[in-house]
């Protein structure tokens, strides 16, 4: 399968955007939805999805991308403020061979701490939802402080 392909309206992120599946929401506006990754690589691992998107960056309209990246920056600042990491990974995958597992454009913000081991995404069991909700609240509050 190549990078491009038909968009699946029933992928898990499309279901979350429609409200058919739950998430631990961090931030939402007319352009994006941000929520905690269910299989985090680090505390504070956040996903940002454009609401109007293609399968990946290549398939997505430039205006959608412009609005999304502005919000990725804002949410990254919120994650930084909430978790005070040593660094942040901000990443996005295009195609299965590149590591994309859900074919709806999305960005990862992953706090990195010097002493914390780091493994591939999706390993192990899902995180505790109460912990994820608490982390989402921390980030949401930090974003509110930035916007004030």
Image (cartoon, rainbow, N blue to C red):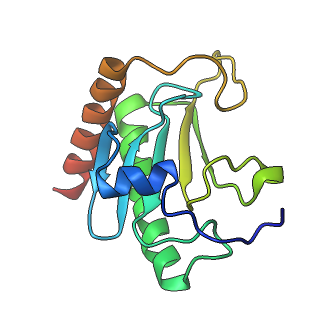
Q: Quadrant of the C terminus?
A: bottom left
Give left or right: position of 67 versus 94: left
Say left or right for 87 vs 47: right
Q: Is residue 118 left or right of residue 44?
A: right
- The extreme left residue here reads 148
Residue displayed at 36% across by 38% down: 81
Left/right placement of residue 71 relative to residue 118 reads left
Q: Residue at x 64, y 69 (%)?
A: 57
Rendered image quadrant of residue 29: bottom left
Question: For the point 30% across and 19% down, which residue is it?
Answer: 130
- How many numbered markers are drawn? 0
Choose between 97 and 21: the one closer to the eye: 21
Task: Locate residue 119, reporting x and y percent.
Answer: 72, 24
The residue lying at 65 percent from left, 71 percent from top is 6
| 41 lies above or below 32 | above
Q: Nearer the viewer, residue 5 or 100?
A: 5
The foreground one among 53 and 48 is 53
Percent of width and height locating residue 59: 64, 76
Q: Position of residue 114 (x, y in %)?
A: 65, 22
Q: Is residue 125 visible?
A: yes
Q: Is residue 73 visible?
A: no
Instruction: Give coordinates of residue 16: x percent, y percent.
Output: 37, 49
Q: Quarter of the image containing the N terminus?
A: bottom right
- Specify the quadrant of the image occupied by residue 40: top right
């Amino acid at each position: 399968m190549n990078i491009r392909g038909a968009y699946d309206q029933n992928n898990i992120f499309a279901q979350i955007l429609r409200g058919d599946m739950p998430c631990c929401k961090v931030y939402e506006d007319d352009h994006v939805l941000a929520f905690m990754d269910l299989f985090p690589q680090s505390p504070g691992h956040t996903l940002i999805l454009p609401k109007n998107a293609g399968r990946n960056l290549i398939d997505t309209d430039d205006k959608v991308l412009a609005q999304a990246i502005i919000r990725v920056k804002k949410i990254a600042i919120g994650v930084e403020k909430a978790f005070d990491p040593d660094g942040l990974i901000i990443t996005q995958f295009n195609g299965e061979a590149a590591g994309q597992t859900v074919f709806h454009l999305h960005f990862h913000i992953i706090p990195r701490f010097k002493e914390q081991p780091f493994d591939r995404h999706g390993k192990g069991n899902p995180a505790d939802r109460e912990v994820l909700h608490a982390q989402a609240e921390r980030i949401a509050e930090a974003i509110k402080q930035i916007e004030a």
